[in-house]
Amino acid sequence: MAFDLESLAEATSGAIGALVSTTILYPLDTCKSKYQAEVRAHHQQKYRNISDVLWEAISTGQVISLYQGLGTKNLQSFISQFIYFYGYSFFKRLYLQKSGSKTIGTKVNLIVAAAAGACTVIITQPLDTASSRMQTSEFGKSKGLWKTLSEGSWREAFDGLGISLLLTSNPSIQYTAFDQLKQRLLKRQLKEKTGTEPSPVALSAFSAFVLGAVSKCIATFLTYPAIRCKVMIQAAKYDDDGDDDETKTAQLKHQKTVSGALYSIWRREGLLGFYKGLEAQILKTVLSSALLLMIKEKISKTTWVLMLALRRYLFTTRTRLKSA
């Protein structure tokens, strides 16, 4: 396949947006993950709500531990978003070229987004698993990336791969909704322009924020039970409820499967347990996605200009070398 400069610019701006939004919201993400990973009967819960996690960090003098695993998470976010946005943009343009269409329908858009998401998950799953283990470790006891991954087998590094592939429907739904809403809004803005030359129109920061928030909120609600199961599967340790070591070990192995995680939630927390921490998840994912898309929209033009300048520089340099 030919080198796609536009897809590369799209991927770079998306990856930078992910890096910034992840860093800003990381303490909230850590609190959310630790709260989601706990599976106990209501009268035995250590964390009654997400604020209890924050208070534990403050009361034990471990506030800095709210950032444990930030480096791994940023690496995972940057790589995953770069791959996702490049794949999405590239597959989308490839479809339009092969089909001869000028627009892409919702169904095809979902397929393209899911394909890009699946490629992303397979490549970055070990980093995702490691960052989840770091976040759910006890405050002050998180280990480095290599040590976290080397403690188990490579198979364990891919814990939750199946459910992660299932969750590719989340960004697929979210980004498809955002893209469709964006196109409608831009078409409306173009119709309002009179007496001017056609030119690219970018969303305002506020519009991108609102569209990103709305689309992500819907996707998060629909996929939340799977999201919580994934956190449990990848959690650093098992929250036991007084069982002996043999029973606890057996339960740990069982809980590391999707069916085991679902059963643990149902047995200990009931139906509402599948949506434990939903508010925090929506707050974190909506803010993260909205910030990501807002930043991406604002820097996409700059990234494109830089890419063109780089290509021109490389072309000029190569021409000079040939003529020398």
Image (cartoon, grey):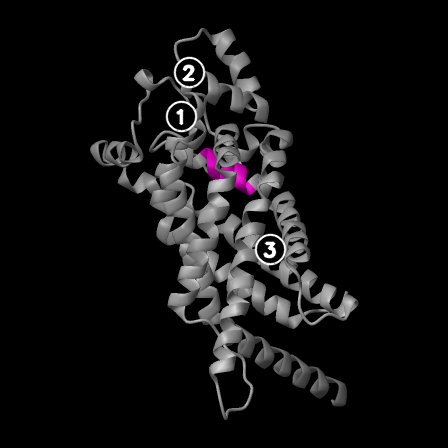
Name the kind of residue labelled 3 in the image. Answer: Tyr
297 is higher (above) or lower (below) than 63: below
Q: Tell me if mark 1 has few (under 14), some (14-19) or many (20+) residues whose alpha carbon lies within 10 angstroms of its own.
A: many
Locate residue 140: give its quadrant.
Answer: top left
Q: Quick one: SS at disc 3?
A: helix
Between the C-alphas of marks 3 and 2, the distance is: 37 Å
Task: In the rendered view, tell whether residue 203 sits above or below residue 277.
Answer: below
- Given the image, on which type of amino acid does mark 2 rest? Asp
- The quadrant of the rendering that contains the N terminus is bottom right
Q: Secondary structure at mark 1?
A: loop
Residue 86 among magenta residues: no
Which quadrant of the view contains residue 57? top left
Question: Horizontally, is 163 left or right of 1 in the view?
Answer: left
**The one of 254 and 155 positioned closer to us in this rendering:** 254
Instruction: Please state the extent of the stretch shown in magenta in the rendering.
Output: 127-133
Q: Position of residue 102 (x, y in %)?
A: 69, 72
Q: Residue at x 45, y 6 (%)?
A: 244
Relative to 38, say whether 132 is above or below.
below
Does the stretch in magenta take in 128?
Answer: yes
Residue 38's mark?
1
According to the picture, the residue beneath numbered tag 3 turns out to be 84
Image quarter hosting the C terminus: bottom right
Q: Which residue is mark 2?
A: 240
